[in-house]
Each structure stands twice: as C-alpha cells, then as structure tokens.
Amino acid sequence: MPELPEVETTLRGILPTLLHSTIDQVIVRNRSLRWPVPDGLEAKLAGQTVENVARRGKYLLIGTPAGTAMLHLGMSGSLRVLDSGIPPEKHDHVDIALTSKKVIRFNDPRRFGSLLWAGDQPFAHPLLAALGPEPLSDTFAGSTLYNAGRNRQVAIKQLIMNSNIVVGVGNIYASESLFRAGINPARKAGRLSRARYDRLATEIKRVLSEAIKMGGTTLRDFHNAEGKPGYFKIKLQVYDRAGKPCNICAQPIKHRVQGQRATYYCSECQT
C-alpha cells in the first residue's frame, strides 16, 4: 500500500497543477470507498480556488476558502493528472476537474481509500488529531522513540509503525530502517538503549528521504501522478527478499508475521 514516500511523491506530482487552480466541479462516480464520500462535498468544492496542498502522515489535504478536503490513497489508490477529455476507466472513482481543463483523477481498485471533508480545522479531524510527529521533521528524533518505548514490551517494529508515535513509517520502510540500524524487528522496545534509538531515528529519516528521491516503491499497484512507478524497490535490502542472501553477510533473509504484517530481516545482522 502507498506509504509516506509514495504519498509525498503523489503530493509533489499534483501540486503544480492543483495549487492556485480553481475547481470547476467534483465528479464522484462511486461513493462507497473505505468511508462513504460525504454528501454535499461536490458542492462545497465547486468554484473554490485551491489555496494549499499538503500532506499529514499518509493523508493529502486540499485547502480552499470553504474548508479542506482530505484524501487517503488506501491500499491501492493513486492520483493522476490528466486532460479533462480522457474518459474514466473502471476504478476511476473521483475526478477533481479544474477550470484549466485538467483533472486530478482518483483511481482505487480495492476501494480502501477515502475522500472526506475536514472543514476549516483539518488538524482537529479525528483521523488527524492524535497523529505523532512527521519523521522528516525536526520534532522527530531518537528521544521521541526512546521515550515512547521505555518499559514497553511491544516489538520495536510495531512501535515505529504506530502512527500515534510517528507517522508514515509503514511496513516496507519499517523493515528497511530496522535492517540499516541493525535491530531485530522482534526486539522488545523497552530493551533498546538510547544510542540504538538515535541510530534508528537517523535510519528512518535516511530511508524515507532516499525513497522520496526515487519516487517511492512500486511492488504492485503504486504509480505517481504521471503514471510512472517508484524505483526504490531496487534499493530494498530485506523487504520481499525472503530466502535471498543478505547483501552484507550472505545469510538468507528471513520472513515472519508481526501484527498480521509481513516482516523481513537478517538474523545475523540484526540483533
């Protein structure tokens, strides 16, 4: 599913077209997404000028004088910038049509995404209010994780994937960050030293930054606003490499399930 680098890549792709543009109309072809598209959203956005486009965690925020729309890509969603005359395909559920004759089109085969109305105080919305710090911001550091993990028995991988502690560290990038930091994903959060948390925070920032530069990771569904895949897959050290040799020690990469999510790691390099 799209994680923070994929959402940030999407944001950067739609920003030049969407920012300061006027919305002609919003066309909703299927309201039955993860949460139903609210009735009246089309009327709220029609005629509005987009004042800002931002990301909070994995949510995209489209700000107008009338309020803010909030979009989540779900497990298989993507946004494309297209000419308005291009006909929709099967899973094209929403169009944000602009007076410039461009369309921001939301495609979501699994319909786990969402388009919601967050009003004039978007960060107070229940889906955003309790989110932790952005991992690429100055407010996130090793101390953030150390303080959250002290005396806790939860596995470290599950801790860093908790969006109330830090946002946007999804399954792929959690596995990659833990590998680079040399930490076994099953290690109890309360058993890690402050120094190891400092290194982990550094690797989370580094992995996410590299992934953004490469347009994210495409394993199956993700494509950017131009329809192109992300290329960080070529730099994955452990994720989706079960049985293949570790690039550091040559031992086979192992696979396990944690919290119903696939985890990949090297038992030799990660302790």
Image (tube, helix red, strand yellow):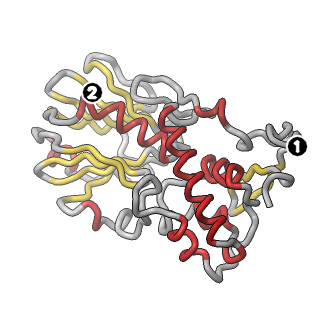
Residue 13: where, in percent of width, then height? 36, 31
Please indicate whether residue 12 sits to the left or right of residue 20 in the image: right
Q: Quadrant of the C terminus?
A: bottom right
Q: Quadrant of residue 230?
A: top right
Vertical relation: 122 (above or below) 82 = below
Q: Amino acid at mark 1?
A: Pro
Vertical relation: 224 (above or below) 154 = above
Residue 217: where, in percent of width, then height? 57, 35
Q: In the depicted view, which residue is nearer to us: 142 or 49?
A: 142
Q: CA distance from mark 2 to mark 1?
A: 46 Å
Q: State the residue lying farthest toward the bottom.
A: 151
Number of numbered markers: 2
Q: Residue at x 44, y 30 (%)?
A: 224
Q: Residue at x 27, y 16 (%)?
A: 85
Q: In the depicted view, which residue is nearer to us: 115 or 180?
A: 180
Residue occupied by mark 1: 252
Q: Residue at x 15, y 48 (%)?
A: 44
Q: Residue at x 86, y 38 (%)?
A: 245
Residue occupied by mark 2: 103
Residue 89: where, in percent of width, then height? 42, 24
Please indicate whether residue 25 sits to the left or right of residue 256 in the image: left
